[in-house]
Structures are given as C-alpha cells and as structure tokens.
Image (cartoon, helix red, strand yellow):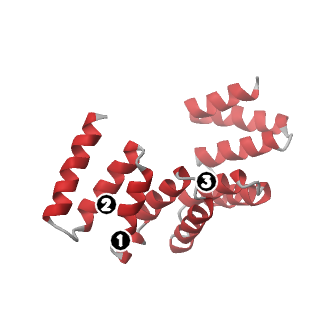
Amino acid sequence: DKSYDAAAEKFKKSVKASPGFDLSELFLAETFLAQGKNAEALKRIDQLAPTLRESAPVLDMRGRALILLKRWNEALETWKAYQTKYPKSVVPYFYIAQIQFIQGNKDAAREAVEVGLRLAPDDLRLQMARADLLWQSGKRDEALLLSTQTAKNKKSLDASVMQGTMHL
C-alpha cells in the first residue's frame, strides 16, 4: 500500500535525522508490521531502549511479529513476559493459547483461555477461542451453544462466522 510506503519513508528519514529517537523507530516498526515486513519490524523493535521494549505496546508488537514469523518459542516467551509484567491484562492470554494450540499443547491452550476469561469474561477473542477448542475436542454441541450465545450477545461478525462454520 502506497500510504504505508510513504509513512515508512518519512519514519526512515526521521530515524536518520535523529538517531536514537525511539519514537521514530517505534512508528517505523509498527509501519513495517502493518506492511507484513515482520522481520524488519522485529529488528527495529529489538533496537529500542530496554525500558521501551518492556512497555505493553512494544511487547504486543514483538509478540505479534514473532507469531507471524512462526518463531513460536520466542513468541511464547514474549507473551509470557507481557503476562508477568502486566498481570491484569487479558491481551497475552489469547496469543499464548494460539501458540500453545499450534504447538499441539491443547491443555495449555485451554488453560490460557480459561485464565484469560476469568480476567475478562466478555473478551470476544477468548470466547471464540474457547468455542473453537471445544469444537476441536469433539464437544460440538457445547461449542455451538457458546458460539451462538456469543454471536447473539455480541452481534459480532466474527462470532457469527464461527457459528456458521460450526454448522458445516
């Protein structure tokens, strides 16, 4: 997309003009992530000052970049660091569940979803992940009921699509 290319060029100029100015690096990393240039985004993220790298938005970007690069162990480590640093945030639980599921650790995926839902019972991504895990484990009626309730309560396209795929 041309608008991302233009933004990236502006942030690159800003980085050159002010080396060490982390906000320019941060915006450039986010732009690269949006463009699908995940390795370049990760490189920029890892060059940020340590205090900024530990912030929630940067841990989030790093975790997403690592998932997109399929570097599962590093991604899991990043999301667990996020979870430790921000224990009241529900954000890492979905990603931890996703990674655990991909790696075949369905019990760990289920545990991440359940813990996340205890923190935020209305979180749509976690509710959908729970329904998907139920479906995958053969509890199809329970999965259908949960996805139907979620679609009805949230009026969400994602929940409606999930409900529809469970009827196939």
Number of other residues with Cα within 10 Å of mark 3, as a class: few under 14, some 14 to 19, many 20 or more: many
The answer to whether residue 146 of the structure is visible from this angle is yes
Q: Position of residue 58 (x, y in %)?
A: 41, 63
Number of other residues with Cα within 10 Å of mark 2, as a class: few under 14, some 14 to 19, many 20 or more: many
| Element carrying mark 2 | helix
- Quadrant location of the N terminus in the rendered image: top left
Q: Is residue 168 above or below residue 37?
A: above
- Quadrant location of the C terminus in the rendered image: top right
Circles 2 and 1, Cβ within 8 Å, touching? The answer is yes
Q: Residue furthest left?
A: 17
Pointer 3 residue? 94
Pointer 1 residue? 52
Kind of residue at badge 3: Phe
N-term-proximal mark, 3 vs 2: 2
| Element carrying mark 3 | helix
Please name which of the two marks, 1 or 3, marks the residue nearer to the observer: 1
Residue at screen point 24% across, 60% down: 24
Q: Answer left or right for 11 relative to 92.
A: left
Kind of residue at badge 2: Leu
Residue at screen point 51% across, 59% down: 63
Pointer 2 residue? 26
Cα–Cα span, label 1 and label 3: 23 Å
Q: Answer left or right for 61 relative to 136.
A: left
